[in-house]
Image (tube, rainbow, N blue to C red):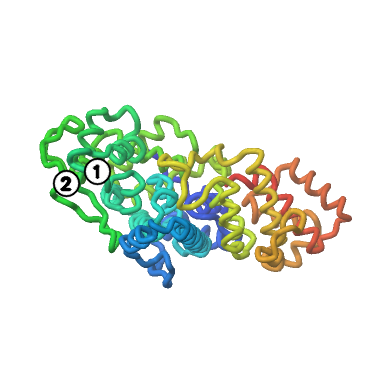
Amino acid sequence: MFSPLAVKNWNYGAAAHLLNRAGFGGTPEEIDQWHGLGLQGAVDRLLQPPAETLEVAPHPWSEPIDLREKRAELRELKAKPAEQKARRKEMRQEQHSELEDLCFWWLNRMAATRAPLVEKMTLFWHGHFATSVQKVKGVYAMWRQNALFREQALGHFPTLLKAVSRDPAMMVYLDLQQSKKEHPNENWAREVMELFTLGIGNYSEADVKAAARAFTGYRIDLARQEFRFVTSQHDETAKTFLGKTGDFSGNDVLDLIVAQPACPKFIGRKLWRFFVEDAPAPATIEATGALLWKHEFQIRPVLRDVFMAEEFYAPAVRRTQIKSPVQFLVQSCKLLETDLPPAPACEGALRSMGQVLLAPPNVKGWDGGKSWVSTATLLFRYNFANYLVNGVGQQGNAPPALRRDPVNLEKLLSPDSRTNSDKLLETLAKRLFQAPLDGKQTQTLHAYLKNEGGAADDQTVRRLLHLMMSTPQFQLT
């Protein structure tokens, strides 16, 4: 198991690290507040946050529509190919608009939430149970899945797993609703073991076939977009699965999967990679898996033990995690104390950086880690940082609809912090990096300010902000 963090080691840097990893970062004032709670108090607040409503204002994507009516409309236009094609295009445009709105709603929730860990775990489960709107088509189904991840974010993994097996978005994505007694579809049965619970090597092809039979009969009520079970399409014969034989249902199969020793290790490794480090040692995977087993797959107490552990705050893991595009966007806006850019700018940025919400590249989800950065994506990050700071593109070429006011420097700097270069750099480094600059960085930035005549006017400070956000250090959290 892990060693508890010593009280003396709970400091500003540790509080910043906790907020960066368990949420989306914080301003110096917010970090001071969380530091003042003490380690136990800060972790408790993350795990038991103030109640937040899960209700949303009416949106096109927050109410189910009868999918039978949509299909009937297109069938009626079958004899009019041109009109049918035009209607299909309209439907795709409507879907894109709704998806952009839903993603923007979620990004704003990440930025403004009083429950940062809940939103961070919602993002984790979205990457774990990867499902893409590109195949699902229905934005309402993606919204319902997103709500499911939020409702179960810190809860019981087996309960979430069973709910996902009956989630319409997942059912469409992995063809579960098409599985028939005569022709069981193996997509869900395979992926639930390979990518969601056990990993390759911990099940056989015979197990895949048996599991597929257990999940036959799963259907979607098209009028209400809800799960329904069709008994006549369920294979009720005996199945041998993971060494057990019986007339197993889908839920029975999932119970047998979770009981496998490989399952807590598999989930534990993914949790550790998401919150701590990309390449956990075998002993760390064993320890995290043991926590899951000890706490009977309840995520909240597992994360409590992780966030209280000395290993979580080790110098070797701090500021070593490459920010995901979502983390980069949300955390940058929080640090600059500015609103998110307009929805089209957010969508375009995430697409350019390689993480479009609700549209992961495949059922494996995003690889994360070093895959987030390349020559192209880094250049985009640097240019986008300029847009966040100054409200225009690199050459002042942002479309008029996407232009925004420059950041308000009065929120970031006191008059005293601009009296000399040392204070200015110290203040901005604390905000952007939560740590002092190293010697080489200090020299480079001092040289920049000297070249600017030592001035600390708004234009110079904004250029300095952009320069600091374009460093390798700022890409890490």
Q: Position of residue 356 (x, y in %)?
A: 51, 50
Q: Label 2, secondary structure: give it.
A: helix
Give the number of the disc on residue 179. Answer: 1
Label 1 vs 2, first from the N-terminus: 1
Q: Quadrant of residue 182?
A: top left
Coordinates of residue 156 in the picture (x, y in percent): 29, 51
Numbered disc 1: secondary structure: loop
What amino acid type should be assigned to the residue bearing mark 1? Ser
In the image, farthest residue toward the bottom:
57
Label 1 – label 2 distance at C-alpha: 8 Å
- Residue 81 lies in what quarter of the image? bottom left
Q: Report x, y in % for residue 249.
A: 17, 44
The quadrant in which residue 32 appears is bottom right
Quarter of the image that includes the N terminus: top left
**Residue at horizontal 27 percent and vertical 45 percent from the top:** 178
Can you name the residue that lies furthest to the front here?
79
Q: Which residue is mark 2?
A: 233
Label 1 with label 2: CB-CB less than 8 Å: yes
User: In the visual, does 244 lie left or right of 166?
Assistant: left
